[in-house]
């Protein structure tokens, strides 16, 4: 039967309809008041998300004193929420933010809130909506993970390495702590593909990734830059230690049987330590030059300076 839109206009029904709607809303609608002295209360809250709302008693309490509502906000998100509230009150601009909230029955969920402020008495009154956005947040995290990961090996890709590098460079600059980068490349990998086929080549790349990972610490980042090129970012590691790690990686690969008898798989490595103040490209360029020297001087070696 088609929906009869005239029922929307029947007098007397509007408030009943609104009550039904707000009670079944898959989220919350609310009014939040903050006085000039910072006292917060929720004069009106409605919606179907009862675990977040709490029981009738808790709602009444929020109508009087809204501070309890903030007790369950995740500590990492609390400052961001407070900044959004402050900014919205100051500029009378739409508040739009997201935060995690622990549920009374356990577990936590992400919520998105949008609320329009208006001056009210000596304070601010917001009219807002709040919905559970946990699914969207999980989906976004999954997409981010995909865009940061090399499909073949499952390692972080070039994009991810660059963002780790930027972060570690800023830490190194601020605290004066050492940071090293190793770039490495398989030797004569084209011959592996040409002799055993591309699939076997792929298998070698994956095995190599696992072997290298086993030699590194949890805080090191091993990434595939593309093709047969890899990188390792080593926080808190000066050049001599980074060179020792590079030698260990080299030995591990050269000593492993990849099933390509009589050919052995080897890698050449270039090592560079970050010099405070230089940019990312200068560090990569130095490691790359050392890798080039390692290739030119016979392969299956690690080089950390132009002269050796
Ligand atoms: N199997 C496989 N091969 C790849 C992949 N990416 C790049 N390659 C191959 O890696 C080889 C790289 O060849 P080159 O750049 O000539 O280097 P190389 O043969 O390793 O020689 P050197 O680096 O000079 O020691 C090419 O044959 C590429 O096709 C991949 O994802 N899988």
Image (cartoon, rainbow, N blue to C red):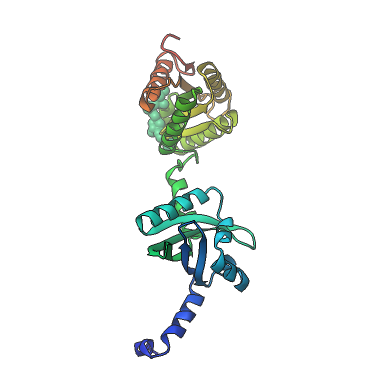
Residue ranking furthest to the top: 307
Please give left or right for residue 90 compared with residue 21 in the image.
left
Vertical position of residue 82 compared to residue 9: above or below: above
- Front one among 130 and 215: 130
Classify the position of the C terminus by image quarter.
top left
Q: Position of residue 52 (x, y in %)?
A: 57, 65
Which residue corresponds to the image point at 52% horizontal and 29% vertical from the top-left?
260
Q: Position of residue 283 (x, y in %)?
A: 40, 23
Whether residue 169 appears in this view of the structure is: yes
Quarter of image, ligand 1? top left
Foreground residue among 254 and 91 = 91
Answer above or below: position of 75 versus 298. below
Q: Please identify the quadrant where the N terminus is shown.
A: bottom left
> Relative to 7, does residue 204 appear above or below in the rendering?
above
Quadrant of residue 278 in the image?
top left
The percent coordinates of residue 225 (x first, y second) are: 42, 33
Q: Nearer the viewer, residue 107 or 127?
A: 127
Q: Which quadrant of the structure image shows residue 288? A: top left
Counting every numbered tag in the picture gives 0
The residue positioned 42% from the left and 8% from the top of the image is 307
Q: Residue furthest right?
A: 105
Q: Residue at x 53, y 72 (%)?
A: 48
x, y percentage for residue 287? 42, 21
């Amino acid at each position: 039967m088609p929906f009869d839109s005239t029922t929307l206009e029947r007098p007397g029904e509007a408030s009943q309809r609104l009550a039904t709607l707000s009670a079944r809303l898959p989220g919350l609608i609310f009014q939040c008041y903050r006085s000039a002295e910072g006292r917060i209360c929720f004069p009106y809250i409605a919606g179907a998300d009862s675990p977040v709302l709490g029981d009738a008693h808790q709602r009444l309490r929020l109508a009087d004193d809204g501070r309890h509502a903030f007790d369950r906000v995740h500590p990492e998100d609390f400052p961001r929420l407070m900044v959004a509230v402050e900014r919205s009150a100051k500029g009378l601009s739409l508040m739009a933010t997201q935060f995690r909230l622990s549920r009374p029955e356990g577990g936590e969920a992400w919520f998105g809130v949008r609320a329009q402020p208006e001056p009210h008495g000596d304070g601010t009154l917001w009219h807002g909506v709040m919905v559970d956005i946990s699914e969207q947040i999980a989906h976004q995290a999954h997409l981010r993970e995909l865009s940061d990961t090399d499909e073949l090996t499952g390692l972080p890709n070039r994009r991810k390495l660059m963002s780790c590098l930027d972060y570690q460079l800023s830490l190194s600059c601020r605290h004066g702590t050492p940071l090293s980068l190793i770039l490495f490349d398989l030797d004569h990998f084209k011959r592996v593909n040409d002799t055993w086929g591309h699939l076997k080549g792929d298998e070698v790349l994956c095995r190599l990734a696992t072997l290298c990972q086993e030699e590194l610490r949890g805080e090191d980042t091993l990434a595939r830059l593309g093709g047969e090129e890899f990188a390792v970012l080593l926080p808190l590691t000066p050049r001599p230690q980074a060179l020792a790690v590079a030698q260990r990686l080299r030995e591990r690969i050269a000593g492993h049987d990849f099933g390509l008898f009589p050919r052995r798989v080897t890698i050449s490595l270039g090592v560079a330590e970050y010099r405070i103040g230089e940019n990312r490209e200068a560090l990569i360029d130095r490691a790359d030059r050392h890798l080039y020297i390692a290739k030119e001087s016979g392969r299956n070696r690690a080089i950390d300076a132009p002269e050796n």
